């Protein structure tokens, strides 16, 4: 495909324009301190986007990933207090997250409940569990020495994790059978099944990937901040993840999507958030701007698709 | 396109595929009520019949896509349970589905290798795009289809080109038993001629059994060795192609139709 016609291209352009704009209007935009802040705005939505994009491609969505994001650090803390080493506690938390994804997948695929509904239910269910096991109090992140820095303590750590996960998930999507079968499942489920692809397995697997990434992201955030609030994450971070994917060119209707686009989409959202904060724009305006950005991106995507002569649905 | 499967040598004339007493229900609809068929290596069987007669359903049972509610299937003389598409494929059964089973958003070469992708050696089993591209081009050139760029998305091709890709995919996968569900449906005369001559070349090899569902009586009688007529879930007539005519087949269809309306 022509480089200029790639769905990510227009978003990269938007990101560059925004950088120039904020560097000119807010004179401390491209400073180390601000870039650190920016990288922290960007990291979590991008990591969540990696999972949501896989799900959107196979025509599913996970509304509960922000809840898993909040749950994981508490599971980690419980496991740590129960005597596991930090790494063991992290693994235990990730296993719990993966199981959440498995349950979502099984209910959605085998009981034919739309994932929008399954994960809406899971949204409240996990909120309740997190509040119960935390009793509503924040938890301190375990102290693991240098590991703390690697896992989010150092200013750019979370962003580097995000870049690493983007690289991995991009490879999975474009260069493995799993990714190809994910696209086939969303693009034409009957054709995929006729070719012998187990579309149930693909969907369940992508729910597991999304929940696990969500949990891991929550853990990174816990190490960056040093403690976790039971009301962290939630729908806000989940929607930022979905929005990053959509702005980056992933179609809600399935069959197409790009992880790199999700990265760029997350960066655009982060630049907007950070830039307007620097400019001192009212925080209330932020949601309005994000909403506008998503609408614009969607209109542009659909127009681009039409222009390329493809059916956008 | 897959690595060669271990298979015994198929002699011309020995039975490749046989189905007996196949019943298939979808809810309250009985799509097949006790259908039998058989085809030998080197032979081509044509299946004719109205829309909704159950032809595609029969084929999808033979590919392992649907499981029958009753009946038995023998492949190469041995009874088999075709409980998945992969299972049927491992026995050398390939199909061009009526809906073509193509994914519009994927490239031609990805579609041609759908679910049997070539991967590079190594722990990550990454896709070998280059090898798939090359072999897809070879496969298309081999059947005389002129498509310059296999990176093109399938959704942007014409109906005939899509059909050609679906046929090329089935043919170039080391099929021993080739099932074709209306393979000429979306094609113009020139393209259809190309596919028919391809099918005839395959038949001439003598070691492939071919089943083709079609709607054009004259054309089917011309290319097939035997034909079978299906109506409302049963086989109502079977004959060697040389011993019947379009007129006779039409007359049987009319008679059944009158009986159904009368009864
Ligand atoms: N997946 C399915 N679910 C429910 N009914 C089906 C399904 N596939 C086929 N049928 C029904 O079975 C009957 C036979 O269909 P089909 O095999 O497609 O006929 P043909 O290929 O001869 O036109 C029709 O009544 C059709 O509606
Ligand atoms: Mg049919």
Image (cartoon, rainbow, N blue to C red):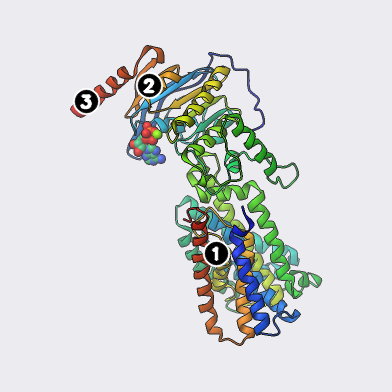
Q: Residue furthest left?
A: B262
Q: Earlier in the sequence, mark 3 or mark 2?
A: 2
The residue singled out by tag 2 in the image is B218
Q: Residue furthest right?
A: A146
Same chain check for tags 3 and 1: no
Q: Nearer the viewer, residue A143 or A274?
A: A274
Q: CA distance from mark 3 to mark 2?
A: 23 Å
Helix or strand or loop: what does disc 1 sit on?
helix
For disc 2, the chain is B
Q: CA distance from mark 3 to mark 1?
A: 57 Å
The residue singled out by tag 1 in the image is A246
| Closer to the eye: label 3 or 2 | 2
Height in image: A45 above or below B259? below
- Indicate the position of residue B24 as horizontal and vertical percent values: 39, 33
Same chain check for tags 1 and 2: no
Under 8 Å from ligand 1: the CB of mark 3? no
Helix or strand or loop: what does disc 2 sit on?
helix
The residue singled out by tag 3 in the image is B258
**Mark 3: few/some/many CA within 10 Å (<14, 14-19, 20+):** few
**Mark 1: few/some/many CA within 10 Å (<14, 14-19, 20+):** many
For disc 3, the chain is B
Quadrant of the rendered image holding ligand 2: top left
Quadrant in which residue B252 is drawn: top left
């Amino acid at each position: 495909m022509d480089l200029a016609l790639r769905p990510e291209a227009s978003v990269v352009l938007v990101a560059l324009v925004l950088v120039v704009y904020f560097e000119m209007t807010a004179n401390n935009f491209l400073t180390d301190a601000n870039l650190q802040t920016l990288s922290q705005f960007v990291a979590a939505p991008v990591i969540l986007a990696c999972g949501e994009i896989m799900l959107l491609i196979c025509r599913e969505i996970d509304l509960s990933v922000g809840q898993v994001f909040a749950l994981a650090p508490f599971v980690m803390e419980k496991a740590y207090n129960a005597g596991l080493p930090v790494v063991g506690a992290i693994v235990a938390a990730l296993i719990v997250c993966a199981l959440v994804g498995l349950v979502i997948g099984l209910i959605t695929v085998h009981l034919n409940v739309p994932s929008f509904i399954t994960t809406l239910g899971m949204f409240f269910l996990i909120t309740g569990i997190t509040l119960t096991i935390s009793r509503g109090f924040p938890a301190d992140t375990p102290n693991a020495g240098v590991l703390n820095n690697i896992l989010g303590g150092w200013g750019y750590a979370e962003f580097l994790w995000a870049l690493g996960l983007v690289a991995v998930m991009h490879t999975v999507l474009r260069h493995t059978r799993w990714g190809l079968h994910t696209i086939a499942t969303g693009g034409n489920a009957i054709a995929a099944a006729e070719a012998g692809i187990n579309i149930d397995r693909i969907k369940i697997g992508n729910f597991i990937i999304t929940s696990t990434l969500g949990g891991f992201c929550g853990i990174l955030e816990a190490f960056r901040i040093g403690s976790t609030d039971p009301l962290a994450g939630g729908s806000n971070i989940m929607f930022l993840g979905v929005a990053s994917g959509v702005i980056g060119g992933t179609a809600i209707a399935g069959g197409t999507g790009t992880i790199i686009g999700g990265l760029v989409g997350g960066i655009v959202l982060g630049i907007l958030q950070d830039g307007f904060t620097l400019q001192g724009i009212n925080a209330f305006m932020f949601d309005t701007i994000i909403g506008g950005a998503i609408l614009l991106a969607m209109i542009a995507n659909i127009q681009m698709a039409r222009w390329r002569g493809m059916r956008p649905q | 396109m897959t690595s060669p499967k271990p298979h015994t040598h198929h002699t011309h004339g020995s039975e490749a595929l046989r189905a007996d007493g196949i019943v298939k229900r979808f809810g309250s609809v009985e799509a097949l009520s006790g259908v039998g068929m058989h085809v030998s290596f080197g032979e081509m069987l044509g299946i004719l019949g109205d829309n909704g007669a159950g032809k595609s359903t029969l084929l999808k049972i033979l590919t392992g896509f649907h499981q029958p509610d009753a009946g038995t299937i023998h492949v190469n003389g041995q009874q088999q349970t075709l409980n998945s598409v992969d299972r049927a494929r491992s026995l050398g059964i390939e199909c061009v589905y009526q809906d073509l089973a193509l994914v519009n958003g994927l490239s031609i070469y990805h579609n041609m290798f759908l679910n049997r992708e070539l991967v590079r050696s190594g722990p990550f089993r990454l896709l070998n795009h280059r090898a798939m591209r090359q072999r897809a081009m070879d496969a298309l050139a081999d059947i005389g289809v002129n498509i310059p760029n296999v990176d093109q998305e399938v959704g942007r091709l014409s109906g005939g080109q899509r059909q050609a890709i679906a046929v090329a995919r089935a043919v170039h996968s080391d099929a021993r038993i080739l099932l074709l569900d209306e393979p000429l449906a979306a094609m113009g005369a020139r393209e259809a001629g190309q596919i028919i001559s391809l099918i005839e070349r395959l038949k001439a090899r003598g070691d492939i059994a071919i089943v083709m569902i079609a709607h054009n009586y004259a054309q089917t009688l011309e290319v097939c060795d035997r034909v079978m007529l299906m109506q409302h879930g049963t086989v109502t007539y079977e004959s060697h192609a040389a011993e019947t005519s379009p007129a006779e087949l039409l007359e049987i269809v009319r008679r059944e139709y009158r009986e159904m309306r009368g009864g």
